[in-house]
Image: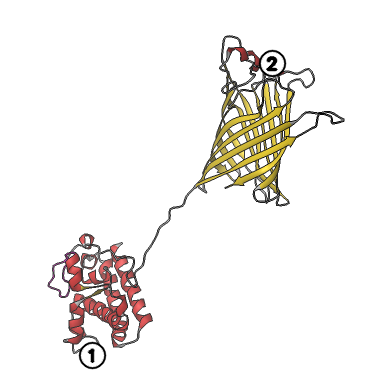
Amino acid sequence: MKKYILLLLVLGTSSFAFAQSDNDVVDYFKAKIDSLVCDTLYASSVGDEEVSANPVYIKLLTSPVLYNSVVNKAFGSGFGVQGGIDHGSLGADDKRSAVIDAMLMSVYREHPGKIYITEEQLRKEAPVPAVATNDVAKIDLKETPVIEMPDNVVGGLKTTVNKPSYWRVSGSFDLKFTQNYVSSNWSQGGENSRVMMATLVLNMNYDDKDRITFRNKFDANLGFTTVEGDTLHSFKTNNDKLRLESTLGYKLIKNFDITAKSKFETQMLPNYPSNSYHFVSKFMAPFDATFSVGINYKPQWKNISLSVFLAPLSAYNYKFVRYDNLVSRYGIKEGRHHREDFGTQLVVEVPSATFFKILNWWSRAEFYTNYARSFFSWENKFDIKLTRYFSVSMLVHTRFDDSSPGLKDKKHGYWQLKEYMTMGLTYSW
């Protein structure tokens, strides 16, 4: 490999000399370069280590240096067409040295600004063996000191290698307000109310553009409302969610991944019914966790992307409730605080869909069953961007859970529904 690198250096440097000048030295170089190349190729083919460890070539392996030997030859005995040397009587190393010296001399005359350092300065910086004659002992090019060229040297090159980053971090933050005021003598009656809603979404995704993807999404929602009819609370939560979802995928074929998925979900603050001090939910009451392995299908079109994940009989569900008085409400046996089982999970998600450039739709539907109980959740969020930092949002959330008898309603049974619409500030990055 070293032999071919040396050959490429000679050929590349000769091309530079041809492009920059047409003096006598270059004419001589043109006449003799073929014999140098042939000599090098022959030596390489027979395994001649004299070429790969020859000190003659060291002048080509350092930064541009003004060598005294080259100048003395040019203005002393001479070389090339002007000199009186019989080149036919020169040895192999003398031929190589003459060609290299001629090339260097053409650079000295035509492009003095390319010279990096003089030979005297070079020897002060590091011990470099002299290479002017054939009497110098052969040296190992591996041990030759490397002189680094400063970035600000005229003609110097600086190379920067940027490693690709496979991680992408993004997120969004919404702060929305709604207010309703009704005077005491309003003909239809009514109550005053104020609603504030904050949403934080953080995404940290890895994609190596080949096989591996690792997606993490943290979703936090917190909303407060005031209702004059509730005499015990000045405000209470109407939306409260903490959810962390991670998906690790390995591409099998186009749009199909084998995927491991995990989800953790709970809430932050206690929630109270109107005119009651007894909370019906709180942090870690309940807490849901799901771990599953399956196949993920991820088609993508111009304005919409889709993810369909199926884990048949390979999903593990865990529910925990930390308060004794709430365990039966969420389908856990008295005296226990958790429930676990295996089943089938299906998750269909629309991470992003854009219509008319201002309407963005996000949707997530999840179904889980252990064939004794079933859980279904379908969230839809619509954002209409009126300006860059101002938008209108609408959320519709439908749930079904027949494992929680405390949530059953005479009118809706196990079906649950939440909907709200707000407007306010939004910021994405």
* Residue situated in front as seen by the camera: 372 or 31: 372
Quarter location, residue 19: bottom left
* Residue situated in front as seen by the camera: 396 or 53: 396
- In the picture of the structure, the residue carrying the numbered disc 2 is 406
- Horizontal and vertical percent position of residue 228: 73, 25
What label sits on residue 329 in the rendered view?
A: none
In the image: residue 417, left or right of residue 109: right
Which residue occupies the extreme left position in the image?
135
Sooner in the amino-acid sequence: mark 1 or mark 2: 1
Decide whether residue 130 is among the magenta residues.
yes
Q: Residues within 10 Å of mark 2 (few under 14, many from 20)?
A: some
Residue at 56% x, 15% y is 337
Q: Secondary structure at mark 1?
A: loop
* Residue situated in front as seen by the camera: 391 or 344: 391
- Horizontal and vertical percent position of residue 156: 34, 69
Residue at 32% x, 83% y is 110
Residue at 20% x, 81% y is 71
* Residue situated in front as seen by the camera: 412 or 370: 412
Q: Amino acid at mark 2?
A: Gly
Q: Amino acid at mark 1?
A: Gln
Q: Residues within 10 Å of mark 1 (few under 14, many from 20)?
A: few
Q: Secondary structure at mark 2?
A: helix
- Residue 91 shows in the view: no
In the image: residue 387, left or right of residue 256: right
Magenta residues span 126-138
- In the picture of the structure, the residue carrying the numbered disc 1 is 82
Residue at 75% x, 18% y is 409
